[in-house]
Image (cartoon, grey):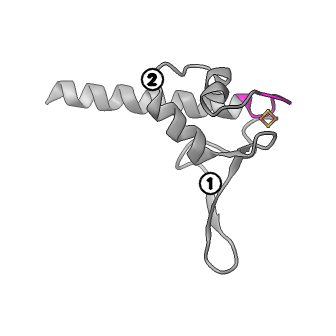
Amino acid sequence: MGGIFCSPAGKRQETGKKPGGKQVQMIVCVCNAKNCRTVREVVAQGPHIDTPAAAHRAMGCKPQCGRCLPAIAGLIEEARAENVLVTAMAAAD
Ligand code: FES
């Protein structure tokens, strides 16, 4: 049941506020306590990261239960699609 903790940007709220106003990120990998922002940062910094397992390695952990794998795959796909769009727009200039 992947994707329940994190979804592509803009489709669902991924952040919230705790009482007191502190901003929180939605957890994507419960086993390793990794949130959407962490996964996106790792994927953005590692163009070689093309699988959820590679993303876990880059975050210094390993997949355990595997529930997050579809959600992380979605975040990787989303990041790569953004890169393709940015590259295409830069080439069009
Ligand atoms: S939720 Fe990521 S390995 Fe379990």
Q: Determine the image quadrant of residue 54.
A: top right
Q: Secondary structure at mark 1?
A: loop
Residue in the picture at 29% in, 26% down: 87
The quadrant of the picture occupied by the N terminus is: top right
Q: Is residue 55 left or right of residue 5?
A: left
Query: Does residue 2 show up magenta in the picture?
Result: no
**Which of the two residues, 76 or 10, is positioned nearer the viewer here?**
76
Farthest left residue in view: 93
What is the magenta range? 63-69
As displayed, is residue 16 above or below residue 32? Answer: below
Question: Picture coordinates of residue 77 (x, y %)?
Answer: 54, 27
Q: Amino acid at mark 2?
A: Pro
In the picture of the structure, the residue carrying the numbered disc 1 is 14
Q: Which mark is residue 58?
A: none
Q: Residue at x 70, y 78 (%)?
A: 19
Give the main secondary structure of the magenta stretch. loop
Percent position of residue 38, x then y: 58, 44
Return the disc, 2 or 1, that comes first in the chain's sequence. 1
Separation of residues labelled 2 and 1 (CA atoms): 23 Å
- Check disc 1 and give the amino acid type: Glu
Q: Residue 34 vs residue 90: left or right?
A: right
Question: Residue 66, image x and y in percent?
Answer: 81, 28
Quarter of the image where ligand 1 sits: top right
Query: Relative to the observer, which residue lies in front, 21 or 8?
Result: 21
Which residue is farthest front?
Answer: 60
Task: Return the x and y of residue 20 as percentages of the image width and height.
Answer: 65, 81
